[in-house]
Image (cartoon, rainbow, N blue to C red):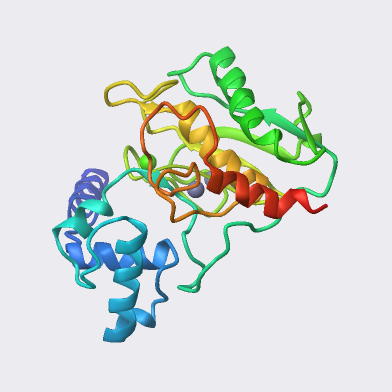
């Protein structure tokens, strides 16, 4: 009986705490901090908070009202990349740091049941080739030796060991790390296909975006650019001039 009581209590507790009602205001505040538009301190200061909301609205191409309105609440529900848009509310640059080594090896890790291994590895390679024409002599090679790899990619769900847990279906689709890390993680909770048909997420489009981070690019405010933070569906087959300008900044002057 004692065991049963504990189980019952545990279920009751989970029911109470698993889905706390977070207000839209709190959700926007959390989003501002998470994606670098504001610090926790900024949230306490009306002027800084208004600035941060405007900055998010500017990036998200919704009216810059400076208040949490319907368009802003809709914006934060849109699927996107998990990499921050600003660093502690300060402007970032569209180029962080490129690869200095001439040969970069990539390793294709755990996949998803939605894609065959062949689809996963060939489209990851194709996404990489969009960028590797702009890396000024740095070349990318597949390896089956994980311990030697520079860029490791895999699908993971929720907490997957890097301190940036995924959030289940929707919201954040993937994230990646700048050189000399370069790793790319895809959220295994999404429904993936290659082209993003219906309610599927385009693996190819997301891979192209994430590999931009692996090359050293940060997010762009240019909506048409590959490096714009929000998901735009499938069909990306080339880089925008803004993406190429970022790559030139990183690689062309070497
Ligand atoms: Ca997600
Ligand atoms: Zn991104
Ligand atoms: Zn990760």
* Image side of residue 113 versus residue 74, left or right: right
Residue 241 quadrant: top right
67 w.r.t. 237: above or below? below
Query: Looking at the image, which is closer to me, 152 or 223?
Result: 223
State ligand 1's quadrant. top left
Q: Residue at x 32, y 21 (%)?
A: 197
**Residue lying furthest front in this view?**
241
* Image side of residue 252 versus residue 85, left or right: right
* Image side of residue 172 versus residue 76, left or right: right
Q: Residue at x 34, y 43 (%)?
A: 79
Residue 180 shows in the view: no
**Residue lying furthest right in this view?**
102
Q: Position of residue 66 (x, y in %)?
A: 23, 73
Q: Residue at x 39, y 48 (%)?
A: 223
121 w.r.t. 8: above or below? above
Q: Position of residue 249 (x, y in %)?
A: 69, 55
Residue 186 shows in the view: yes
Q: Quadrant of the N terminus?
A: top left
* Image side of residue 195 versus residue 128, left or right: left
Q: Position of residue 227 (x, y in %)?
A: 50, 46
Q: Position of residue 21 (x, y in %)?
A: 16, 59
Residue 110 quadrant: top right
């Amino acid at each position: 009986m004692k065991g049963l009581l504990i189980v019952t209590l545990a279920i009751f507790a989970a029911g109470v705490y698993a889905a706390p009602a977070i207000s839209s205001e709190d959700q926007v505040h959390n989003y501002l901090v998470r994606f670098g538009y504001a610090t926790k301190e900024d949230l306490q200061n009306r002027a800084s908070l208004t600035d941060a909301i405007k900055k998010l609205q500017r990036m998200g191409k919704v009216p810059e009202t400076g208040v949490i309105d319907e368009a802003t609440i809709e914006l934060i529900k849109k699927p996107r990349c998990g990499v921050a848009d600003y660093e502690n509310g300060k402007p970032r640059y569209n180029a962080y740091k490129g690869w200095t080594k001439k040969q970069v090896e990539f390793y294709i890790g755990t996949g998803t049941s939605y894609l065959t291994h062949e689809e996963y590895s060939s489209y990851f390679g194709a996404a990489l080739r969009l960028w590797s024409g702009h890396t000024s002599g740095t070349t990318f090679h597949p390896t089956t030796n994980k311990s030697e790899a520079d860029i490791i990619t895999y699908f993971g769900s929720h907490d997957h060991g890097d301190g940036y847990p995924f959030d289940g279906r929707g919201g954040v689709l993937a994230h990646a790390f700048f050189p000399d890390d370069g790793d790319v993680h895809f959220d295994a909770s999404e429904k993936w296909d290659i082209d993003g048909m219906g309610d599927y997420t385009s693996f190819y489009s997301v891979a192209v975006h994430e590999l931009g981070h692996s090359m050293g690019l940060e997010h762009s405010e240019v909506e048409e650019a590959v490096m714009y933070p929000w998901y735009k569906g499938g069909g990306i087959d080339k880089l925008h001039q803004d993406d190429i300008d970022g790559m030139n900044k990183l690689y062309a002057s070497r």
